[in-house]
Amino acid sequence: DAGVIQSPRHEVTEMGQEVTLRCKPISGHNSLFWYRQTMMRGLELLIYFNNNVPIDDSGMPEDRFSAKMPNASFSTLKIQPSEPRDSAVYFCASSSATGRETQYFGPGTRLLVL
Amino acid sequence: EDQVTQSPEALRLQEGESSSLNCSYTVSGLRGLFWYRQDPGKGPEFLFTLYSAGEEKEKERLKATLTKKESFLHITAPKPEDSATYLCAVLRGSNYKLTFGKGTLLTVNP
């Protein structure tokens, strides 16, 4: 079975531009998580969806970040406008049931904002 | 607030030299402790889940153990392909939010 799929794998953009990251969770998983990983802060949860509904977005840094899950097989994380401090690796993960089960991670999107 | 501390931050071993990585945690109502392996440029890869003190799980050269305050990842006779960052994470009983440690970077030299 295919794992979590993320695109693009790498993104280089200039400050002020809009960035959209995409995620396809594992088929049958109904919980989806977006994480950000930096050297300083490690892995941090940004937002959690269950059955396509955002449950907890308390980790979203600020209003420049938004996430959607229009259906069970697709989610986006958007940053508008992007800033250099947003440079990081963004991971999507999915799990079954209520989200308290094992989370399986995608390969990540490495974002560099110049 | 849940806290997870991993030590050492980095560990360099010779091939065949067994050792252990430590993950100490402070969380009320632990539901599960997770170990992941992360290779450079890749996402964390799931290794183990431990649910209660005294539990042990093994996979090839890796064995994970859990007490009420910490978990150990024992690596027996490691090989260069075991080189990676090993991440520990905890899940609280009523929550879905994994709290991760900063990881241990393991390097195994041939």
Image (spheres, grey):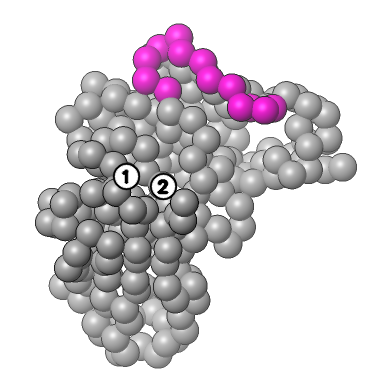
Q: Magenta includes B54?
A: yes
Residue at image coords 42%, 67%: A6
Question: Which label number is shown at residue A104?
Answer: 2
Residue A74 visible to an observer of this rendering: yes
Where is residue A100, by image quadrant?
top left
Residue A57 visible to an observer of this rendering: no
- Split into 4 quadrants, where in the image is the C terminus of chain A? bottom left
Q: Position of residue B8 (x, y in %)?
A: 60, 35
- In the depicted structure, whether residue B67 falls above or below residue A48: above
- In the depicted structure, whether residue B45 falls above or below residue A38: above
Between the C-alphas of marks 2 and 1, the distance is 6 Å
Residue tagged 1 = A95
Q: Are marks 2 and 1 in contact (CB under 8 Å)?
A: yes
User: Label 2 is placed on what type of residue?
Assistant: Tyr
User: Label 1 is placed on what type of residue?
Assistant: Ser
Chain of the residue that carries numbered disc 1 in the rendered image? A
